[in-house]
Amino acid sequence: MPEMTPRERVLAAINHQEPDRVPLDIGGGSSTSIVVEGYENLKQYLGVSGETQEANRIFRVARLDERVMQRLGSDCRPLGIGPPSRWKPPPPPEPGTFVDLWGITWRQADYGNGCYYWELARNPLAEATTRDLERYPWPDPLDPGFTAGLAERTRVLYEETDYAIMADGGFKSFWELGFMLRGFEQLLMDLALNPEFVSALMSKLLEINKVATERFLDIAGPYMHVFRTADDLATQRGLLMSPHTFRTLLKPVYKEYFSFVKSRTDAKIFYHSCGNVVDLLDDLIEIGVDIINPVQVSAMGDTAALKARFGDRVTFWGAIDTQHVLPHGMVEEVEAEVQHRIRDLAPGGGFVVAPVHNVQPDVPPQNIIAMAEATREFGAYPLAA
C-alpha cells in the first residue's frame, strides 16, 4: 500500500478503514502526552534542548517540541484554546497553592525525586445549594483570550502541515469538573441524596460549555479532525456510579453537548475516561462518542473481546499499558505489548496507538521510543497473522 500522510492515516483509521499502518499519537492531546519530568528525561536522551512548556498546568502535561514529535512519528498535532484575557488569578491563599479559573484551589503535592502534582485543596461549592449556583462567579465563556489567535493557528495546522488535528475547546467537562467544584465524596452522595443539585449543576456547566464551545467551533470546526472531550467515570474496578444513575442524571447532558458539537463540525468525538467503562460504552456510542480513550487495559480486560463487541462502532485510542509495561518492562516487553494490542484492536481499522494516559516520569525514554518504533514495525497493513 502506498505511504499515507499522517492526516490520511488517522482519518482512515477513525473511519474504520485500514490505512497503510496503524496511526500513532504521542503529544496530540492532554491525555496522550508526557508529564513534564518524564518529557525532560526524553529530551535529554534525544539530545533536544529548549525550555519545556506545559500544555495543562493542573495535570502538568508537557507541550511536545515539534522535533520530538517528528522523531517519535506522531501522526497528530494539538489545537487548543488560549488563556483568558479578562480574568486574572487571585493571590494564592497560601504558599504552594493556586486558584484556577473556576475558583477551585489546588495544592502542590510532592511525590519524590523532584516530581509533583496538583491536588484538590478547596472545593468552592462544597456547601452550596441550588440557589447558590446562580450567584456563583462563573467563568466568562466569551472571554476573547480563549480564541485569540485561534484562526491563524488552525490555518497553519490545516494548510501547512499534513497532520491530523486533535482539537480541545477547553470547556467540555461535566462530572469531573463537577466534583472538583463540589468535592468528590459530596457529589457522589448528591447522586443519591440530592439529585436536584446534581441536575442543576450539570445544567449550569452545560450552559457555559456550550457557549464557549460554539465560539471555538465557529473558528476551528471546519478544519479539525478529532474533538477531544473528557470526564473520568470509572475506577480500575468499575463505574463510579450505577448505569441507571448515569443514564438518569448525566447521559442527557452528554447527549445534548455531543449533539451540539456534531451540529457544528464533522470531527469525530474523542471521549477520555480512565478506568473500566465497558458497562457504559453502549450508552456513550449511542449518544455520539466516536473514539474511546485511553482504553485502560489493566482495567478493561481482554482487548480482543472489546474489539469483537464494540470495534465496528467505536475507535480505540490508546491501549499501551502505562501502569506495568511502559514503566517496568524491558524494551522487548514494550514491543510485545504494542504487537499484542495491534493484533487485537487494529484489524479493519479503528485503532490509534497511544499510551494509556500520559507517560509518567518513571517510564524510561528507551521504552517511549520502543513504543513508537514498534508501532511502525508491527502496524503495517495487511497485518501479520
Image (cartoon, rainbow, N blue to C red):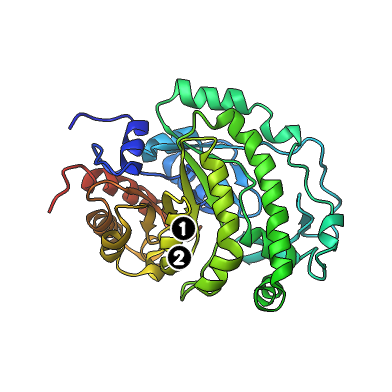
- Looking at the picture, does residue 160 appear above or below residue 268? above
Residue at image x 38%, y 41%? 72
- Residue 251 coordinates in the image, percent (x, y): 55, 61
Q: Residue furthest left?
A: 385
Is 201 positioned to the left or the right of 159 in the image? right
- Residue 228 coordinates in the image, percent (x, y): 52, 46
Q: Which residue is mark 2?
A: 280
Would you call the spot at circle 2 few (<14 residues within 10 Å), some (14-19), or many (20 or more)? Answer: some
Is 192 positioned to the left or the right of 155 in the image? right
The answer to whether the residue labelled 2 contacts the one labelled 1, judged by CB atoms less than 8 Å apart, is yes
Mark 2 is on which residue type? Leu
- SS assignment at label 2: helix
- Looking at the picture, does residue 277 appear above or below residue 351? below
Is 63 positioned to the left or the right of 383 in the image? right
Q: How far is disc 2 from disc 1 in space, using C-alphas?
A: 6 Å
- SS assignment at label 1: helix
Quadrant occupied by the C terminus: bottom left
Q: Which residue is mark 1?
A: 284
- Residue 316 coordinates in the image, percent (x, y): 36, 53
Residue at image x 54%, y 53%? 255
